[in-house]
Amino acid sequence: MTAQTLSGKELAASIREDVTLRVAELTASGRPVRLAVVTATEDESSAWYVRAIAKAAAKVGITCDIADLGSKADRQKISDTLVALSADPAVHGIILQTPLPEGLTLEELGSAIAPEKDVDGANPLSLGRLAAGLPAFAPATAEAVVTILEHYDVPVSGRHAVVVGRSTVVGKPAAHLLLDRHATVTVCHSRTADLAAVTSQGEILVAAVGRAGLITADHLKDGAVVIDVGTNPTPDGGLVGDVDAAAAERASAMTPVPGGVGPVTTALLLRHTAEVAERA
Ligand SMILES: NC(=O)C1=CN([C@@H]2O[C@H](COP(=O)(O)OP(=O)(O)OC[C@H]3O[C@@H](n4cnc5c(N)ncnc54)[C@H](OP(=O)(O)O)[C@@H]3O)[C@@H](O)[C@H]2O)C=CC1
Ligand SMILES: Nc1nc(=O)c2c([nH]1)NC[C@@H]1CN(c3ccc(C(=O)N[C@@H](CCC(=O)O)C(=O)O)cc3)C=[N+]21
Protein backbone atom coordinates (compact mmCIF):
# COMPACT_ATOMS: atom_id res chain seq x y z
CA MET A 1 0.00 0.00 0.00
CA THR A 2 1.20 3.47 -0.71
CA ALA A 3 -0.20 6.39 1.20
CA GLN A 4 -2.57 8.98 -0.21
CA THR A 5 -0.81 12.35 -0.48
CA LEU A 6 -2.43 15.02 1.66
CA SER A 7 -1.24 18.01 -0.32
CA GLY A 8 -1.50 21.41 1.33
CA LYS A 9 -1.01 23.42 -1.85
CA GLU A 10 -4.57 23.57 -3.14
CA LEU A 11 -5.96 24.10 0.36
CA ALA A 12 -3.48 26.96 0.88
CA ALA A 13 -4.46 28.47 -2.46
CA SER A 14 -8.14 28.45 -1.52
CA ILE A 15 -7.39 30.08 1.84
CA ARG A 16 -5.30 32.74 0.07
CA GLU A 17 -8.14 33.34 -2.39
CA ASP A 18 -10.51 34.10 0.48
CA VAL A 19 -7.90 36.33 2.15
CA THR A 20 -7.27 38.17 -1.14
CA LEU A 21 -10.94 39.19 -1.36
CA ARG A 22 -11.07 40.30 2.25
CA VAL A 23 -7.84 42.29 1.98
CA ALA A 24 -9.04 43.93 -1.28
CA GLU A 25 -12.19 45.08 0.48
CA LEU A 26 -10.22 46.51 3.41
CA THR A 27 -7.71 48.19 1.11
CA ALA A 28 -10.51 49.71 -1.01
CA SER A 29 -11.99 51.25 2.11
CA GLY A 30 -8.66 52.87 2.97
CA ARG A 31 -7.54 50.25 5.50
CA PRO A 32 -4.44 48.54 4.06
CA VAL A 33 -3.36 45.38 5.87
CA ARG A 34 0.12 44.99 7.36
CA LEU A 35 2.03 42.06 8.86
CA ALA A 36 5.32 42.46 10.73
CA VAL A 37 7.81 39.58 10.82
CA VAL A 38 10.47 39.85 13.50
CA THR A 39 13.45 37.54 13.14
CA ALA A 40 16.68 37.13 15.09
CA THR A 41 18.03 33.87 13.73
CA GLU A 42 20.05 32.46 10.86
CA ASP A 43 18.17 29.16 11.11
CA GLU A 44 17.54 27.91 7.59
CA SER A 45 14.01 26.62 7.98
CA SER A 46 13.05 29.89 9.62
CA ALA A 47 14.54 31.72 6.62
CA TRP A 48 12.45 29.48 4.33
CA TYR A 49 9.38 30.50 6.25
CA VAL A 50 10.16 34.22 6.16
CA ARG A 51 10.61 34.05 2.38
CA ALA A 52 7.38 32.08 2.03
CA ILE A 53 5.48 34.64 4.14
CA ALA A 54 6.83 37.57 2.10
CA LYS A 55 5.88 35.89 -1.18
CA ALA A 56 2.41 34.85 -0.05
CA ALA A 57 1.67 38.22 1.57
CA ALA A 58 2.49 39.98 -1.70
CA LYS A 59 0.10 37.61 -3.52
CA VAL A 60 -2.84 38.45 -1.28
CA GLY A 61 -2.16 42.19 -1.04
CA ILE A 62 -0.83 42.29 2.53
CA THR A 63 2.20 44.49 3.13
CA CYS A 64 4.88 42.50 4.93
CA ASP A 65 7.62 44.26 6.91
CA ILE A 66 10.59 42.12 7.90
CA ALA A 67 12.57 43.31 10.92
CA ASP A 68 15.77 41.26 10.82
CA LEU A 69 17.49 41.97 14.13
CA GLY A 70 20.34 39.52 13.58
CA SER A 71 21.24 36.44 15.61
CA LYS A 72 23.09 38.56 18.19
CA ALA A 73 20.06 40.63 19.15
CA ASP A 74 19.44 40.74 22.91
CA ARG A 75 16.22 40.49 24.91
CA GLN A 76 15.80 44.27 25.17
CA LYS A 77 16.19 44.88 21.44
CA ILE A 78 13.68 42.20 20.50
CA SER A 79 11.23 43.21 23.19
CA ASP A 80 11.46 46.94 22.26
CA THR A 81 10.77 46.05 18.63
CA LEU A 82 7.70 43.98 19.56
CA VAL A 83 6.37 46.70 21.87
CA ALA A 84 6.78 49.37 19.17
CA LEU A 85 5.01 47.23 16.56
CA SER A 86 2.25 46.45 19.08
CA ALA A 87 1.66 50.20 19.52
CA ASP A 88 1.72 50.98 15.78
CA PRO A 89 -1.89 51.26 14.55
CA ALA A 90 -0.81 50.54 10.93
CA VAL A 91 0.42 47.05 11.93
CA HIS A 92 -2.22 44.33 12.29
CA GLY A 93 -0.25 41.14 12.80
CA ILE A 94 3.08 40.37 14.46
CA ILE A 95 5.05 37.12 14.28
CA LEU A 96 8.30 36.51 16.11
CA GLN A 97 10.30 33.77 14.41
CA THR A 98 11.77 30.87 16.32
CA PRO A 99 14.43 29.80 17.09
CA LEU A 100 15.59 32.79 19.15
CA PRO A 101 19.14 33.71 20.17
CA GLU A 102 20.70 31.55 22.90
CA GLY A 103 19.04 32.02 26.27
CA LEU A 104 15.90 33.76 24.99
CA THR A 105 12.54 32.04 24.81
CA LEU A 106 9.34 32.64 22.88
CA GLU A 107 7.44 32.07 26.12
CA GLU A 108 8.90 35.24 27.69
CA LEU A 109 9.27 37.44 24.60
CA GLY A 110 5.79 36.55 23.35
CA SER A 111 4.32 38.65 26.18
CA ALA A 112 5.62 41.76 24.37
CA ILE A 113 3.23 41.08 21.47
CA ALA A 114 -0.17 42.76 21.92
CA PRO A 115 -2.64 39.85 22.32
CA GLU A 116 -4.99 41.28 19.65
CA LYS A 117 -2.11 41.27 17.09
CA ASP A 118 -0.75 37.89 18.15
CA VAL A 119 -1.40 36.13 14.83
CA ASP A 120 0.93 33.21 15.62
CA GLY A 121 -0.31 32.61 19.16
CA ALA A 122 3.02 33.39 20.84
CA ASN A 123 1.75 35.38 23.81
CA PRO A 124 1.23 32.98 26.74
CA LEU A 125 -2.23 34.54 27.07
CA SER A 126 -3.12 33.13 23.65
CA LEU A 127 -1.94 29.63 24.54
CA GLY A 128 -3.77 29.83 27.87
CA ARG A 129 -6.99 30.87 26.18
CA LEU A 130 -6.55 28.09 23.64
CA ALA A 131 -6.09 25.56 26.43
CA ALA A 132 -9.17 26.94 28.16
CA GLY A 133 -11.27 26.64 25.01
CA LEU A 134 -11.62 30.44 24.67
CA PRO A 135 -11.27 32.31 21.36
CA ALA A 136 -7.60 33.01 20.54
CA PHE A 137 -5.29 32.72 17.56
CA ALA A 138 -3.65 29.32 17.60
CA PRO A 139 -0.11 29.17 16.22
CA ALA A 140 -0.64 28.90 12.47
CA THR A 141 1.26 25.60 12.22
CA ALA A 142 -0.84 23.88 14.86
CA GLU A 143 -3.98 25.14 13.17
CA ALA A 144 -2.64 23.91 9.82
CA VAL A 145 -2.48 20.37 11.25
CA VAL A 146 -6.18 20.26 12.12
CA THR A 147 -7.19 22.27 9.04
CA ILE A 148 -5.59 19.62 6.81
CA LEU A 149 -7.29 16.77 8.70
CA GLU A 150 -10.63 18.54 8.36
CA HIS A 151 -10.13 19.36 4.67
CA TYR A 152 -9.46 15.70 3.84
CA ASP A 153 -12.37 14.50 6.03
CA VAL A 154 -10.10 12.54 8.35
CA PRO A 155 -12.19 11.66 11.41
CA VAL A 156 -10.62 12.89 14.63
CA SER A 157 -13.27 12.42 17.31
CA GLY A 158 -12.68 9.33 19.42
CA ARG A 159 -9.45 8.43 17.64
CA HIS A 160 -6.00 8.18 19.14
CA ALA A 161 -3.74 11.02 17.97
CA VAL A 162 -0.06 10.90 18.88
CA VAL A 163 1.89 14.16 18.66
CA VAL A 164 5.68 13.96 18.64
CA GLY A 165 7.10 17.27 19.89
CA ARG A 166 5.89 19.60 22.66
CA SER A 167 7.04 23.06 21.60
CA THR A 168 4.88 26.11 22.25
CA VAL A 169 4.74 26.81 18.51
CA VAL A 170 3.61 23.39 17.33
CA GLY A 171 3.35 20.31 19.54
CA LYS A 172 1.50 21.72 22.55
CA PRO A 173 -1.08 23.82 20.70
CA ALA A 174 -1.63 20.99 18.17
CA ALA A 175 -2.39 18.67 21.09
CA HIS A 176 -4.93 21.19 22.45
CA LEU A 177 -6.63 21.59 19.07
CA LEU A 178 -6.87 17.80 18.64
CA LEU A 179 -8.23 17.46 22.17
CA ASP A 180 -10.87 20.12 21.39
CA ARG A 181 -11.91 17.96 18.46
CA HIS A 182 -12.31 15.02 20.83
CA ALA A 183 -9.26 12.97 19.91
CA THR A 184 -7.53 10.92 22.60
CA VAL A 185 -4.17 12.65 22.60
CA THR A 186 -0.71 11.44 23.57
CA VAL A 187 2.25 13.83 23.42
CA CYS A 188 5.81 12.49 23.01
CA HIS A 189 9.11 14.34 23.39
CA SER A 190 12.85 13.76 23.69
CA ARG A 191 12.50 11.87 26.98
CA THR A 192 9.77 9.55 25.85
CA ALA A 193 11.20 6.19 26.81
CA ASP A 194 10.10 4.02 23.87
CA LEU A 195 9.00 6.33 21.10
CA ALA A 196 8.07 3.63 18.57
CA ALA A 197 5.93 1.80 21.15
CA VAL A 198 3.87 4.94 21.68
CA THR A 199 3.72 6.28 18.13
CA SER A 200 2.67 2.89 16.76
CA GLN A 201 -0.60 3.30 18.66
CA GLY A 202 -1.50 6.48 16.81
CA GLU A 203 -4.29 6.35 14.27
CA ILE A 204 -3.21 9.91 13.59
CA LEU A 205 0.47 10.76 13.95
CA VAL A 206 1.75 14.34 14.03
CA ALA A 207 5.53 14.65 13.74
CA ALA A 208 6.90 18.03 14.88
CA VAL A 209 10.49 17.43 15.94
CA GLY A 210 12.90 18.81 13.37
CA ARG A 211 14.90 15.65 12.65
CA ALA A 212 14.97 14.20 9.18
CA GLY A 213 13.90 10.57 9.08
CA LEU A 214 13.21 10.24 12.82
CA ILE A 215 9.87 8.57 12.14
CA THR A 216 10.21 5.35 10.16
CA ALA A 217 7.69 2.73 9.06
CA ASP A 218 8.40 0.90 12.37
CA HIS A 219 6.97 3.87 14.27
CA LEU A 220 3.58 3.67 12.57
CA LYS A 221 0.37 1.83 13.12
CA ASP A 222 -0.86 0.19 9.89
CA GLY A 223 -3.03 2.67 8.03
CA ALA A 224 -2.09 5.67 10.17
CA VAL A 225 -2.73 9.19 8.88
CA VAL A 226 0.58 11.04 9.13
CA ILE A 227 0.97 14.81 9.36
CA ASP A 228 4.63 15.69 8.88
CA VAL A 229 5.36 19.16 10.29
CA GLY A 230 9.14 18.89 10.20
CA THR A 231 11.06 21.08 7.77
CA ASN A 232 14.65 19.99 7.64
CA PRO A 233 17.01 21.57 5.12
CA THR A 234 19.11 19.09 3.12
CA PRO A 235 22.71 19.75 2.03
CA ASP A 236 21.59 20.19 -1.60
CA GLY A 237 19.26 23.07 -0.69
CA GLY A 238 16.08 21.01 -0.47
CA LEU A 239 13.67 20.43 2.38
CA VAL A 240 12.57 17.13 4.00
CA GLY A 241 10.20 16.29 6.82
CA ASP A 242 10.63 14.23 10.00
CA VAL A 243 9.05 11.15 8.43
CA ASP A 244 11.09 8.71 6.38
CA ALA A 245 9.84 8.32 2.81
CA ALA A 246 9.52 4.54 3.27
CA ALA A 247 6.90 5.12 5.99
CA ALA A 248 4.44 5.78 3.16
CA GLU A 249 4.24 2.00 2.75
CA ARG A 250 2.55 1.69 6.11
CA ALA A 251 0.49 4.89 6.30
CA SER A 252 -2.90 5.34 4.65
CA ALA A 253 -2.29 9.04 4.06
CA MET A 254 0.62 11.41 4.54
CA THR A 255 1.42 15.10 4.04
CA PRO A 256 4.38 15.77 1.73
CA VAL A 257 7.32 18.05 2.57
CA PRO A 258 7.47 20.49 0.88
CA GLY A 259 3.89 21.13 -0.15
CA GLY A 260 2.05 19.91 2.94
CA VAL A 261 1.77 21.70 6.28
CA GLY A 262 4.06 24.58 5.24
CA PRO A 263 1.91 26.35 2.65
CA VAL A 264 -1.20 25.96 4.83
CA THR A 265 0.67 27.49 7.78
CA THR A 266 1.61 30.52 5.72
CA ALA A 267 -1.92 30.96 4.39
CA LEU A 268 -3.44 30.76 7.88
CA LEU A 269 -1.00 33.34 9.23
CA LEU A 270 -2.24 35.73 6.53
CA ARG A 271 -5.87 34.87 7.31
CA HIS A 272 -5.28 35.70 10.96
CA THR A 273 -3.75 39.04 9.94
CA ALA A 274 -6.76 39.91 7.77
CA GLU A 275 -9.06 39.01 10.69
CA VAL A 276 -7.24 41.46 12.96
CA ALA A 277 -7.57 44.18 10.32
CA GLU A 278 -11.31 43.48 9.98
CA ARG A 279 -11.78 43.84 13.73
CA ALA A 280 -9.80 47.11 13.92
N1 LIG B 1 5.79 23.38 8.37
C1 LIG B 1 5.61 24.35 9.22
O1 LIG B 1 4.73 25.16 9.06
C2 LIG B 1 6.44 24.44 10.43
C3 LIG B 1 7.48 23.59 10.60
N2 LIG B 1 8.20 23.62 11.74
C4 LIG B 1 9.23 22.61 11.83
O2 LIG B 1 8.80 21.63 12.76
C5 LIG B 1 9.89 21.11 13.47
C6 LIG B 1 9.67 21.32 14.95
O3 LIG B 1 9.66 22.70 15.24
P1 LIG B 1 9.57 23.25 16.73
O4 LIG B 1 8.42 22.65 17.41
O5 LIG B 1 9.67 24.71 16.61
O6 LIG B 1 10.95 22.65 17.31
P2 LIG B 1 11.53 22.60 18.79
O7 LIG B 1 12.98 22.31 18.63
O8 LIG B 1 11.09 23.78 19.56
O9 LIG B 1 10.82 21.33 19.42
C7 LIG B 1 11.14 20.04 19.03
C8 LIG B 1 10.40 19.04 19.89
O10 LIG B 1 10.79 17.73 19.50
C9 LIG B 1 11.18 16.98 20.62
N3 LIG B 1 12.23 16.03 20.27
C10 LIG B 1 13.52 16.29 19.98
N4 LIG B 1 14.19 15.15 19.71
C11 LIG B 1 13.31 14.14 19.87
C12 LIG B 1 13.40 12.73 19.75
N5 LIG B 1 14.54 12.12 19.40
N6 LIG B 1 12.29 12.01 19.99
C13 LIG B 1 11.13 12.61 20.33
N7 LIG B 1 10.98 13.94 20.45
C14 LIG B 1 12.06 14.69 20.22
C15 LIG B 1 11.66 17.98 21.64
O11 LIG B 1 11.55 17.43 22.93
P3 LIG B 1 11.94 18.24 24.28
O12 LIG B 1 10.77 19.16 24.53
O13 LIG B 1 12.06 17.19 25.29
O14 LIG B 1 13.20 18.98 23.98
C16 LIG B 1 10.71 19.14 21.38
O15 LIG B 1 9.53 19.01 22.12
C17 LIG B 1 11.11 21.84 12.88
O16 LIG B 1 11.60 21.07 11.80
C18 LIG B 1 10.54 23.12 12.35
O17 LIG B 1 11.32 23.69 11.33
C19 LIG B 1 7.93 24.46 12.77
C20 LIG B 1 6.92 25.35 12.66
C21 LIG B 1 6.14 25.42 11.47
N1 LIG C 1 7.02 31.72 15.51
C1 LIG C 1 7.25 30.82 14.57
N2 LIG C 1 6.21 30.20 13.97
C2 LIG C 1 6.44 29.29 12.98
O1 LIG C 1 5.47 28.74 12.42
C3 LIG C 1 7.79 29.00 12.58
C4 LIG C 1 8.81 29.68 13.22
N3 LIG C 1 8.53 30.56 14.21
N4 LIG C 1 10.11 29.45 12.89
C5 LIG C 1 10.46 28.60 11.79
C6 LIG C 1 9.46 27.50 11.57
C7 LIG C 1 9.54 26.88 10.20
N5 LIG C 1 8.28 27.17 9.58
C8 LIG C 1 7.96 26.91 8.25
C9 LIG C 1 6.71 27.23 7.74
C10 LIG C 1 6.40 27.05 6.41
C11 LIG C 1 7.33 26.53 5.57
C12 LIG C 1 6.97 26.37 4.15
O2 LIG C 1 6.01 26.94 3.65
N6 LIG C 1 7.67 25.58 3.41
C13 LIG C 1 7.32 25.34 2.04
C14 LIG C 1 8.52 25.51 1.17
C15 LIG C 1 9.01 26.94 1.22
C16 LIG C 1 8.90 27.66 -0.08
O3 LIG C 1 8.48 27.08 -1.07
O4 LIG C 1 9.28 28.84 -0.08
C17 LIG C 1 6.69 23.96 1.96
O5 LIG C 1 6.75 23.24 2.96
O6 LIG C 1 6.12 23.65 0.92
C18 LIG C 1 8.59 26.19 6.05
C19 LIG C 1 8.89 26.38 7.38
C20 LIG C 1 7.52 27.89 10.43
N7 LIG C 1 8.10 28.11 11.58
Image (cartoon, grey):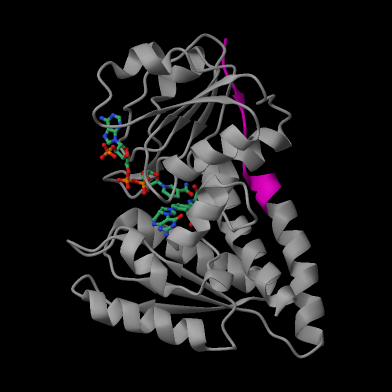
Ligand 1's quadrant? top left
Query: Does the image show residue 139?
Result: no
Q: Quadrant of residue 20?
A: bottom right
Residue depicted at x 70% and y 68%:
275
Quadrant of the image containing the N terminus: top right
Q: Is residue 64 above or below residue 42?
A: below
Front residue (pair 38, 249): 38
Say how many tags the image has.
Answer: 0
Tell me where residue 179 appears, x and y as whole percent. 58, 33
Residue at 70%, 35% in the rendered image: 150
Residue lying farthest to the front in this orientation: 132
Q: Position of residue 249 (x, y in %)?
A: 50, 13
Q: Is residue 277 left or right of residue 251?
A: right
**Quarter holding the C terminus?**
bottom right
270 in magenta: no
- Residue 143 visible in this rendered orientation of the protein: yes
Residue drawn at 56 percent across, 82 percent down: 91
- Position of 255 relative to 237 (above/below): above
In the image, residue 44 sits, relative to residue 171, either above or below, namely: below
Is 34 on the left or on the right of 104, as rendered?
Answer: right
Q: Is residue 11 magenta?
A: yes
Residue 261 x, y percent position in the rendering: 54, 43
Q: Quadrant of residue 45?
A: bottom left
184 relative to 135 in the view: left or right? left
Q: Give me the residue at 41% from left, 82% from top.
A: 83
Foreground of the two, 270 or 139: 139
The boundaries of the magenta stretch are 1-12
**Where, by quadrant of the figure, is residue 235 drawn?**
top left
Question: Residue 242 in the image: x percent, y percent?
Answer: 38, 33
